[in-house]
Image (cartoon, grey):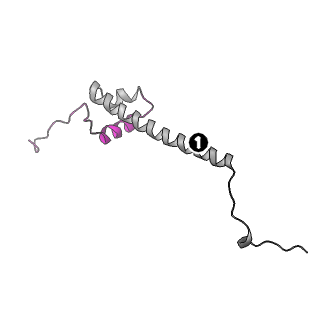
Amino acid sequence: MPSRLSAANTPPYEPSAALKQAEEKWLEAVEAEEKARHAYRKAIADELRASGESHGRVAAATLYTPETVRGIAKEYGVPGKRQRAASPSEG
């Protein structure tokens, strides 16, 4: 009867060169996507700042919701178009 190899005696799995290469390409694509996403978000913030348009109007021309555009504006320190009037207690 042939002896069974125990898990401790089996060599570790070594992925093929094709698998390693595919993973490397995928990780590069993920990194490129992340950089592009940040550049897009910065461009939205720059557009808000330069145009003076509301978050909702700019959002309508982007892939993001108005809520996300407001978050981007906050992240990049872009003030909202409408300024809240000071209440008498703040005066």
Q: What's the amino acid at mark 1?
A: Lys
State which quarter of the image contains the N terminus: bottom right
- Percent position (x, y) of residue 76? 30, 39
Residue at (82% x, 72% y) in the render: 4
Q: Is residue 63 left or right of residue 69?
A: right
State which quarter of the image contains the C terminus: top left
Q: Residue furthest left?
A: 91
- Percent position (x, y) of residue 9? 73, 72
Crowd tier of the residue under label 1, counting other residues whose Cα lies within 10 Å: few below 14, some 14–19, many 20 or above: few
Q: Is residue 24 left or right of residue 49?
A: right
- Please state which of residues 31 and 72 is positioned toward the viewer in this rendering: 31
Q: Main secondary structure of the magenta part?
A: loop
Residue at (69% x, 51% y) in the render: 16
Q: Residue furthest front?
A: 17
Q: Is residue 70 magenta?
A: yes
Query: Which segment did they paint magenta?
Result: 62-91
Secondary structure type for disc 1: helix
Residue at (16% x, 35% y) in the render: 85
Where does label 1 land, which residue? 25
- Percent position (x, y) of residue 48? 31, 29
Q: Is residue 90 magenta?
A: yes
Residue at (36% x, 31% y) in the render: 43
The quadrant in which residue 70 appears is: top left
Q: Residue furthest right?
A: 1
- Percent position (x, y) of residue 81? 25, 30
Q: Is residue 51 left or right of residue 29?
A: left
